[in-house]
Each structure stands twice: as C-alpha cells, then as structure tokens.
Amino acid sequence: MKLTIRISLKKVILDPQGEAIFNSLKALGFEKVISVRQGKILEIEINETDQEIGKKIADKMCQKLLVNNVIETYSVEVD
C-alpha cells in the first residue's frame, strides 16, 4: 500500500521559503500569484492491505519522526 503524506507549516507560522518563491515568481512576471506556502510530500510504501491500519501507521510515523507538531500540520492519503 502507498501512503502519501503532505506536510505543511501551520498558517500562523512564517514561511520564508514560500515568501522567497513568491517574490521570485512576482519578479518573473507572474502577477496573478497571491501567496505561496512551501511544504513537502512523502510517498511511503508499506506492507499492509488494511487501509485503517495503514493510516494508523502513517499517523505514528508522523508523530514520532516526520512532523514537528509545534509548527507543522499533515494529512495522509492511503492508496
């Protein structure tokens, strides 16, 4: 089973990378861009067939290692 984990900064946290990308896009003439937030996507394959168990495994991985819960949020898709 494939897990897709999307990690992003919480809305109240400043995002200097997103701001740099935003400024660069504006400088390149992309005037319609309103804002940019930088994040990361992890694709992890596990040996599991039950989707509920897969989601629980992904949640444990996020809580123990992948996500800084103080400044980041995450979502999990199970394929």
Image (spheres, rainbow, N blue to C red):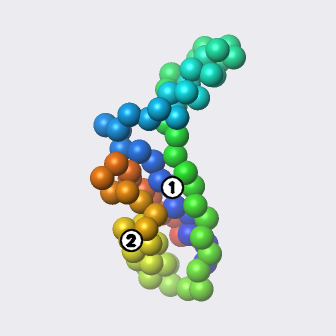
User: Could you say which disc has been placed on residue 64 in the image?
Assistant: 2
Q: Position of residue 42 (x, y in %)?
A: 58, 61
Residue type at mark 1 is: Arg
Image quarter hosting the N terminus: bottom right
Q: How far apart in space, not on screen, are marks 1 and 2 (Cα)?
A: 16 Å
Is residue 55 in view from this perspective? no
Image quarter hosting the C terminus: bottom right
Q: In this view, does 20 lie above or below 7?
A: above
Is 9 situated left or right of 2 in this image?
A: left
Q: Do the residues labelled 1 and 2 touch (CB within 8 Å)?
A: no
Is 23 situated left or right of 60 in this image?
A: right
Q: In the rendered image, which residue does mark 1 sit on?
A: 6
Dot 2 falls on a residue whose secondary structure is: helix
Closest to the camera, between mark 1 and mark 2, is: 2
Is residue 11 in view from this perspective? yes
Q: Where is residue 17 in the image (x, y as percent from the top left)?
A: 52, 35
Q: In this view, does 66 lie above or below 36?
A: below
Q: In this view, does 31 lie above or below 78?
A: above
- Nearer the N terminus, badge 1 or badge 2? 1
Residue at 69% x, 17% y is: 28
Is 68 situated left or right of 2 in this image?
A: left
Residue at 64% x, 14% y is: 27
